[in-house]
Amino acid sequence: MLLSAHGVSFTIPAGWEGEISQERGPQALALAERGAHLRPVAHAATFALPAERGAFGSGAVEAMRDDDVFLALVEYDRGATDTALFARRGLPRRLDPRRFHPAALQRTLPGQAGHQEFFTDTGRAFCLYVVLGDADDAHLQVRRVEEVLAGIRIGSGP
C-alpha cells in the first residue's frame, strides 16, 4: 500500500498499518492557532494504530505485543537543518540492533526498546523514532523496520 502526503511517501508492507498526517496534539493545535506550521508526522506499525496518539507514539506503543514494531517519522522546523543535531544527511535505511535500548523510549514499557536518529533530507529536518516490542529480538525486528525504511521517499516538502 502506498501512502503519500506532505511531501513524504511510504510503501507499507503487507501486515503493516500506516498514516501520514499533521501533528494534532493540544500544544500543536494551540501553536497553529497563533500561526505556527503543523509538522508532518508519519506512523507505521505492525498493529492497529489507535486514532488518538502522540507524534512519538504515546497512546499506541502501550498496545504493542512482543512481536510488534512502531515507527514514527516526525518533521521539525526547517531552521533545524543547520543545527548539529540534524547534521546527518539522508534518511537512515539500515539500523544497528545494538543501538536499541529501553532508556531511549519516550515512555519506558516492560520488554520494549527504542532508538531515534535525527537527520536532514531534501532540506527538511526529521527524527526517526522506532520502538521494538521485544528488546531481546532486536535483530529480527529491526530487519522488519528496514523493509519500511526502504520504501520511504522524502520530497522537498509541501
Image (spheres, helix red, strand yellow):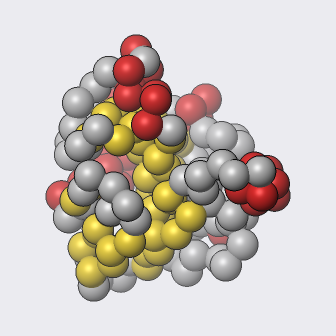
Quadrant housing the N terminus? bottom left
Residue 138 x %, y %:
37, 46
The residue that appears at 56% across and 64% down in the rendered structure is 22
Residue 131 in view, yes or no: yes
Residue 42 x %, y %:
46, 62
Residue lying at the far front of the rendered structure: 35
The residue that appears at 23% across and 43% down in the rendered structure is 122
Is 41 placed above or below 121 here?
A: below
Q: How many marks?
A: 0
* Residue closer to the observer: 33 or 13: 33
* Residue closer to the observer: 53 or 14: 53
Q: Is residue 16 left or right of residue 105?
A: left
Residue 97 x %, y %:
32, 37
The residue that appears at 56% across and 32% down in the rendered structure is 104
Residue 5 is drawn in which quadrant? bottom left
Q: Is residue 61 left or right of residue 40?
A: right
Residue 117 in view, yes or no: no
Is 80 placed above or below 14 here?
A: above
The residue that appears at 32% across and 62% down in the rendered structure is 7
Residue lying at the far top of the rendered structure: 84
Residue 3 is drawn in which quadrant? bottom left
Quadrant housing the C terminus? bottom left
Residue 39 x %, y %:
55, 53
